[in-house]
Image: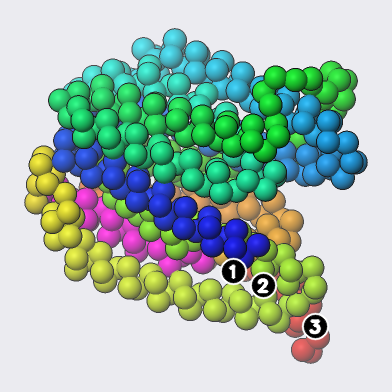
């Protein structure tokens, strides 16, 4: 287990490096401007839809597939996985077609009060980027199947190729502009999905073959839908928390969305390395402690997590505040000038003010998962999106475009602040108080 996690951590770091490879060329070629603003806006709806489906699928797929495996019929497991993959891929294709056909109506609604140049760029990119819905939905499903077949490394390594493909296209054809950026995004994800498909085949699952009987598959599908329904509100809220900020920030004029987008990618890379790579370890640790009724150890772990989060949060605020703009200006060049570096660094700093809360909130979420409390996860996701919207409305006039990043940090803080009473009210953690009494 530890060896697998070490490999995944290394591959996660490598994928972040490859993503930065593409980001570096993007910054040199586009800087902060209307083309990149439109591209970022065009990604919002495809990412939102595929993210919701992925979260919903994950919750229902794993337990149903595990039950089939316990039954001891490998052929049934293969037939079930094959049917799920083809079903999800088909749904993704339908979404892609509908979004592409509806792009003339969708683009102005999502663009809102963005400048006309941004709306034009979004209208150019959106019809082609809708294919990301089908690719992401298929890719997420394949990734889950690889994980259940103990092929974690393949799913973790595939994004490396994605970043390399996109970066190489930008490096070799910079004059291609927005067309090249869109092409690299689609081809990069297609290569990533192709690698995962190869991995799935090497793991013993072929795309061609029998499916489960219709009646049995209908029963299993109903079971997956019921399981996923418990977490669906939380999945929707979580994805809205990610999707709303790019739409809001676009209303602050040309370049605002681009600057926010760079900062968000840098912030997300840091979060990925600090939190997401260790999430399986944290979840497994809490699961063992909860299963063994080690209440004091859970509290001690929460205390250590809070201390570590505070240290990392303060360190991040200081470093980004002092070095953010100079380092970005040094690393990037081309159309990414000093003004762009300062603008991106300001967005990044406001996001970093919520880093400590984001880390601790993730630890809370892993504890609630280990306690099998999906309702709590949905409630906290709802608190997050409501806080995000309220803070943005309150700070919009005072902070301008930076109000969006500040609202994101406030949302992360709200999860921790409102989550603490739920932790204290947990029947599991209250046991130690009764024992102490």
Residue 333 position within the rendered picture, expressed as x and y whole percent measured from the top left: 12, 46
Which residue corresponds to mark 3? 434
Q: Residue 120, which numbered label?
A: none
Question: What's drawn in magenta, residue-wise?
Answer: 339-362
Residue 165 position within the rendered picture, expressed as x and y whole percent measured from the top left: 34, 34
Q: Is residue 312 left or right of residue 115?
A: right
Disc 1 is placed on an element classified as helix
Asked where in the image residue 228 lies, by quadrant, the reply is top right
Within the magenta stretch, is there residue 2? no
Residue at 40% of width from left, 63% of height from top? 355
Which residue corresponds to mark 2? 424
Disc 2 vs disc 1: Cβ atoms closer than 8 Å? yes
Which residue corresponds to mark 1? 420
Magenta region's main secondary structure? Answer: helix
| 98 and 252: which is toward the camera | 98
The residue positioned farthest toward the bottom in the image shown: 437
Within the magenta stretch, is there residue 346? yes
Residue 232 position within the rendered picture, expressed as x and y whole percent measured from the top left: 65, 39
Residue at 70% of width from left, 43% of height from top? 149
């Amino acid at each position: 287990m530890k060896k697998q996690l070490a490999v995944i951590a290394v591959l996660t770091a490598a994928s972040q490096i490859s993503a930065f490879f593409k980001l570096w060329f993007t910054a040199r070629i586009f800087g902060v401007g209307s083309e990149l603003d439109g591209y970022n806006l065009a990604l919002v709806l495809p990412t939102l839809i595929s993210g919701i489906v992925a979260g919903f699928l994950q919750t229902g797929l794993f337990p149903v597939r595990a039950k089939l495996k316990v039954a001891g019929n490998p052929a049934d497991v293969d037939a079930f996985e094959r049917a799920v993959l083809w079903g999800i891929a088909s749904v993704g294709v339908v979404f892609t077609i509908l979004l592409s056909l509806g792009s003339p109506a969708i683009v102005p609604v999502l663009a809102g009060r963005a400048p006309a140049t941004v709306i034009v760029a979004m209208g150019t990119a959106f019809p082609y980027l809708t294919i990301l819905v089908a690719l992401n939905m298929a890719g997420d499903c394949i990734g889950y199947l690889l994980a259940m077949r103990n092929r974690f490394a393949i799913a973790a390594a595939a994004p490396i190729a994605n970043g390399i493909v996109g970066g190489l296209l930008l490096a070799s054809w910079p004059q291609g502009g927005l067309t090249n950026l869109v092409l690299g995004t689609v081809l990069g994800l297609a290569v990533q999905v192709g690698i995962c498909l190869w991995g799935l085949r090497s793991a013993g699952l072929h795309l061609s073959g029998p499916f489960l009987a219709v009646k049995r598959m209908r029963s299993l599908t109903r079971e997956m839908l019921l399981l996923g329904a418990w977490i669906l509100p939380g999945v929707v809220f979580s994805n809205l928390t990610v999707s709303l900020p790019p739409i809001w920030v676009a209303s602050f004029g040309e370049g605002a969305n681009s600057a926010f987008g760079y900062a968000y990618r840098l912030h997300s890379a840091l979060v990925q390395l600090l939190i997401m790579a260790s999430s399986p370890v944290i979840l497994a640790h809490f699961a063992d402690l909860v299963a063994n009724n080690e209440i004091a150890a859970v509290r001690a772990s929460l205390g250590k997590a809070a201390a570590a989060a505070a240290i990392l949060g303060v360190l991040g605020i200081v470093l980004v505040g002092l070095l953010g703009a100079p380092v970005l200006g040094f690393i990037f060049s081309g159309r990414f000038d000093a003004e762009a570096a300062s603008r991106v660094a300001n967005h990044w700093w406001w996001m970093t003010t919520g880093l400590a809360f984001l880390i601790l909130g993730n630890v809370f979420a892993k504890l609630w998962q280990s306690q099998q409390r999906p309702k709590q996860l949905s409630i906290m996701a709802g608190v997050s999106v409501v806080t995000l919207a309220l803070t943005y409305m309150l700070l919009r006039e005072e902070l301008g475009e930076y109000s969006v990043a500040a609202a994101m940090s406030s949302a992360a803080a709200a999860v921790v602040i409102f989550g603490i009473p739920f932790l204290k009210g947990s029947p599991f953690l209250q046991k130690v108080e009764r024992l102490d009494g």
